[in-house]
Amino acid sequence: GSLWATHNAFLPAALPIYCAAQWYQFMPSGQILQFGRVEDTNGIVSYAFPSIAVNSVDDVLLGFSRFSPTTYASAAYAFRSSTDPTNQMQVDRVLKPGEGPYFKTFGGGRNRWGDYSATMVDPVNDLDMWTIQEYAAAPLGAISRWGTWWGMVSASGGVRFDVPTYSVNEAPPPGFINITVVNAEGTAGTVEWS
């Protein structure tokens, strides 16, 4: 029932010196339900080219590039469980550290980066999430190179039904059905049924 979006945010607004991965959850009417940033408020580390995915239990995976004046562009992500405090992601994690400098303009005036950022929910279970992110690979001589790195976050999922819907004939004689409950976290929880 809601929409999620992400984009770069250059900060501070008056005189930008770093980049944050900014994300939103909002209603189709435009009402913002959540807003947050993955950022280094000291202005040293930048997070850019984000992509976002949300699973069936509202867990969120945000993939992005992470870099600073002293670290090469790395493949990274941040996760948010549906039970985490509103407007907050957990601490960011590096999937693959950058290995070297990267500079390619392809004859233009800008360093080309960020074409390979994608994050999605696994269609097999609608819980786990995958991200593929770009990182600065080790140079080949003087030639800059990039690479991609996959990561999978096995989402909590909590306690849920194995199949979202079941049906049974209630007419006499009464029908019966076995309902399978999956405890993905391994901790106590409940499911509702009627």
Image: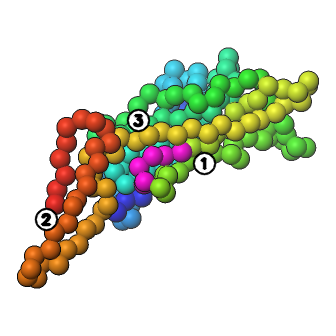
- Judge from the rendering whether residue 102 lies leftward or rightward of residue 73; answer left or right: right
Q: Which mark is residue 89?
A: 3
**Comes first in the chain, label 3 or label 2:** 3
**Which residue corresponds to mark 2?**
194
For the point 73% across and 40% down, the residue is: 113
Q: How is the image coloured?
A: rainbow
Quote the CA–CA distance across marks 3 and 2.
34 Å
Q: Are marks 3 and 2 in contact (CB under 8 Å)?
A: no
Above or below: residue 39 compared with residue 154: above
Q: Amino acid at mark 3?
A: Met
**In front of the other: label 3 or label 1?**
1
Q: Nearer the viewer, residue 4 or 60?
A: 60
Give the image location of residue 137, x and y in percent: 76, 29
* As drawn, 157 above or below 172: above
Point out the tag, 2 or 1, that comes first from the N-terminus. Answer: 1
Residue lying at 38% horizontally and 64% vertically, measured from the top left: 28
Does the magenta portion include 158? Answer: no
Disc 2 marks which amino acid? Ser
Q: Which residues are magenta?
A: 125-130
